[in-house]
Amino acid sequence: MKKIISILLLLILVLIGIISFRTLTATNYQRNIKASPAPQLSDSALLHFQQAISYKTISYADAKDWDSVPFLHFRTFLETTYPLVHQHLAREIVNNYTLVYKWQGSDHALAPYILMAHQDVVPIEEDTKKQWTFEPFSGTIKDGYIWGRGTTDDKINLISIFESAEKLLQQNFQPKRSIYFVFGHDEEIGGNHGAVRVAKLFKERNIKADLVLDEGGILTKEKIPGLTKPVALIGTAEKGYLTLKFSVNKKGGHSSQPENETAVDILTKALVTLRANPFEPKFVEASQDFMKYLGPEMKFPNNMAFANLWLFRPLVVNKFEQQAASNAMMRTTAVPTIINAGIKDNVVPTLATAIVNFRLLPGDSSTYIIKKVQEIIADNRVIVQPYDENISEASATTPTTSAAFQLIDSVVRKSYDSISTAPFLLIGATDSRHFNQISTNIIKFSPMLDPIGFHGINERVSIESFRHAIWFYEQLLGSCK
Ligand SMILES: [Zn+2]
């Protein structure tokens, strides 16, 4: 007995030893690069941003709502506001509205960089109009923020790129490497008329880029618990997109004598079963990198858990499951978004349908998920089929060892004082997903600190964020000399 107890004690001691050793010796991936202070924000830059918000460049899901006028006016605004960019860069208009600029580099041997942003914004939901503090397209400045639809998504990136390029041109800057700017006009509805067309064009022209940078991860002080400094989340991969339609057909009839099971019952049961059986949690490469970069930056016990995933994985999974955003980082998600059945209060419907949106984790292909959904529901009365053509597989992962990641990581560090950085799996979709044949080095990052109201009410971004965004792009473009 005594012997067994001493062996057990020894084992516990060894375990504690291993855990502590791994925690204390975890590699620190935070590079020691000094930030240079961001220059003052000019009144003119701020005014330009406000003006950019006033153009209602809305993309609607329904093509008949499309209004081209704001896009044409916005284009004219860019031409008059940024004369040097329009004088020195070649502009091409793709499919009437998407803007592509080429800043010719002096060294033809170097592969280009591509910077992306989108012109379009999501509409303001009718029911929410009254809840906005300021008119959504006014670009009001209040409490240190610029308010309005499109401030965070994605005009901060678009305007900061123009401001920094115009400023560098004033200083007679000439890049060595060619730089493209790609500004799509339908990102919010899938990018099929904008980014997809540009990617096709670039492929035909054999353009291969060393870096594609698009919107994505942000800087946050609030979103990740356990950190003392803000962290810049640099997107190295993004989830895929799939929507399925579930349909159930069953004879309806009079509601005075309902069958034991109706089409609505069958559909509801399928949806409940699907939601009750979430897909397997997995820490994909981008998420493992996230933990490697942030673990040592965290306090006890988070640092210990991240450094010893072999032991604490169930605890970490449990923690991630408690928040919608972190849960979405580790599994393919499924959620019903549209449900339809019935026409009259006393008629049992014959057809019930549900539209279910999936966000695919890298590794979970759309074909695999469709098969898996059918297995989970296990009811062949529910017909499962793709809702539309708008299917994207999850992106490949840009390695943290790539020159592209290292470049963005260093420019971020040069632009912000006292921050951490971390690779990141983006759970939303961006236009850059269409560029996987143009580059294997795609980074998704939006230089702004804790923006508010993304796609929602009172969307706004701080003036400080805008000042640093221009500084970030200025240093990034400047690195091409
Ligand atoms: Zn966006």
Image: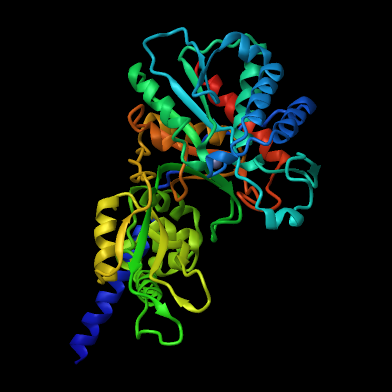
Q: Position of residue 383 (x, y in %)?
A: 29, 63
| Relative height, residue 182 to residue 330 (above, below) | above
**Which residue is drawn at the image coordinates 38% and 75% (left, top)?**
252
Rendered view: 40 above or below 351 = above
Q: Quadrant of ligand 1?
A: top right
Q: Residue at x 54, y 60 (%)?
A: 226
Depth check, front residue: 332 or 440: 332
For the question of whether residue 74 can be seen, the reply is: yes
Task: Give the quarter of the figure containing the N terminus.
Answer: bottom left
Residue in front for this viewpoint, 118 or 26: 118
In the image, residue 40 lies at what x, y percent? 74, 29
Task: Return the residue nearer the eye: 143 or 226.
Answer: 143
Q: Residue drawn at (60%, 30%), measured in percent from left and top? A: 158
Residue 301 appears in the figure: no
Classify residue 244 by image quadrant: bottom left
Q: Position of residue 78 (x, y in %)?
A: 66, 22
In the rendered view, does 326 fall on the left or right side of 20?
right
The answer to whether 466 appears left or right of 273 in the picture is: right
Q: How is the model colour-coded?
A: rainbow
| Left or right of 136, for residue 23 | left
Q: Determine whether 267 is above or below 410 in the image.
A: below
Counting every numbered tag in the picture gives 0
| Residue at the outermost front position | 254
Q: Which of the pair 26/9 is nearer the observer?
A: 26
State the image coordinates of residue 108 (x, y, percent, origin top left): 40, 9
326 w.r.t. 417: above or below: below
